[in-house]
Image (cartoon, helix red, strand yellow):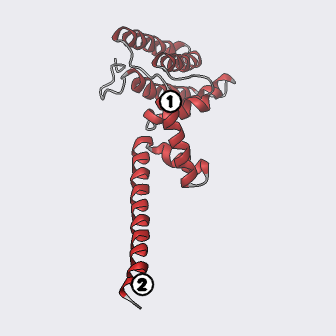
Amino acid sequence: MSTGTILAIVIPVAVVIALIALAIVLDRRRRRRLRERFGPEYDRTVDDAGSRRAAEQELGAREKRHAELDIKPLPSGARERYAEEWRGVQEEFVDRPEGAVHEADRLVTSLMRERGYPTEGFEQQMRDLSVEHGRTLEHYRAAHEINTLSSSRQATTEQLRGAMVHYRALFDELLSNGDAAGPGRA
């Protein structure tokens, strides 16, 4: 074989190998970025989607939808008002635990709406929140399940107490506007 023929074979093979290696590196970076951004929600989405590729497409679609939303921080007056409302909900828990849990759900939904999140349908709320709040999403999911149980009077007082803790985790994060020390911790 001539040198020209060998080069005509080796160069395209080397280019293909380099492109494959580049694709693998980029795929790993994207996967790492999605894992970091979505936290535990990444693994949950992979389990639900049945494949990593389908899950990553789903998470990418969530990011795209989220980028189109008008998510905004709260003015300090609104944050103070929500923090005060939360204190009232916590006080209500002593005498009316089920009512307080329902009120906590309403307050979290109201806070989401005011921040700019759509609030129609729990599953869509979960998808929208997962982009910025993936690490606290399990709290919201657990609180929602207990709230549903309490609607049919099947939740224990301890479960209701847990729901308040779960709602508080997302509430504080939404109220903090992404700050490390949430102002909702009054």
Which one is in front, 151 or 47? 47
Give how far across and how far down residue 138 sits, in percent: 50, 37
Badge 2: residue crowd in 10 Å (few <14, some 14–19, many ≥20): few
Whether tag 1 and tag 2 are in contact, CB under 8 A, the answer is: no
Residue at image position (33%, 19%) is 183
Residue type at the position of mark 1: Gly
Which one is in front, 73 or 111? 73
Q: Quadrant of the C terminus?
A: top left
Give how far across and how far down residue 45 sits, in percent: 55, 46
- Residue 138 shows up from this direction: no
Q: CA distance from mark 1 to mark 2?
A: 72 Å
Residue type at the position of mark 2: Thr
Give how far across and how far down residue 182 sits, in percent: 33, 23
Residue 183 in the figure: left or right of residue 112: left
- Image height check: is 45 above or below 108? below
Res 25 label: none
Residue at image position (45%, 41%) is 38
Residue under label 2, please give it: 5
Residue under label 1, please give it: 162
Q: Quadrant of the N terminus?
A: bottom left
Classify mark 1: helix, strand or loop: helix
Q: Which comes before the other along the chain, label 1 or label 2?
A: 2
- Image height check: is 162 above or below 27? above
Residue 127 in the figure: left or right of residue 39: right
